[in-house]
Image (cartoon, grey):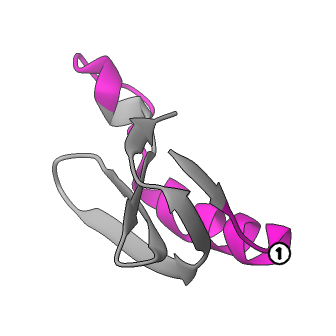
Amino acid sequence: MKVSCLQEDFQRALGRVTRAVATRTTMPVLSNVWIGSEDGRLKIAATNMEFAVTTRIDANVEVEGMITV
């Protein structure tokens, strides 16, 4: 994945979704944030299996992909 976006937009989106990141879990992936490119935008999501938060921001997507961080 190769994308570029405004740092301010990315930080705001991360602030929104980190509310759903699980702090104590038996599934380590739930402590991650999912970042993927979709239709020329960046989709950022997190869940703790009780609720999920997803947001999208405008981005320049050169190569599509996804990752958890």
Q: Which residue appears farthest toward the front when viewing the image?
A: 62
Compared to residue 41, the image places residue 18 above or below, namely above
Is residue 3 one of those drawn in magenta? Answer: no
Q: In the image shown, does 11 or 37 lie closer to the viewer?
A: 37
Q: Can you tell which quarter of the image residue 51 is in?
A: bottom left
The residue tagged 1 is 8
- In this rendering, position of residue 9 left or right of residue 66: right
Q: Position of residue 37 (x, y in %)?
A: 41, 62
Q: Which residue appears farthest toward the bottom when viewing the image?
A: 58
Report the residue at 31% width, 27% height from top.
29
Tell me which segment is drawn in magenta.
4-29
For label 1, the SS is helix
Report the residue at 42% width, 35% height from top.
68
Compared to residue 31, the image places residue 62 above or below, namely below
Q: Position of residue 34 (x, y in %)?
A: 40, 47
What secondary structure is the stretch in magenta mostly built from?
Answer: helix
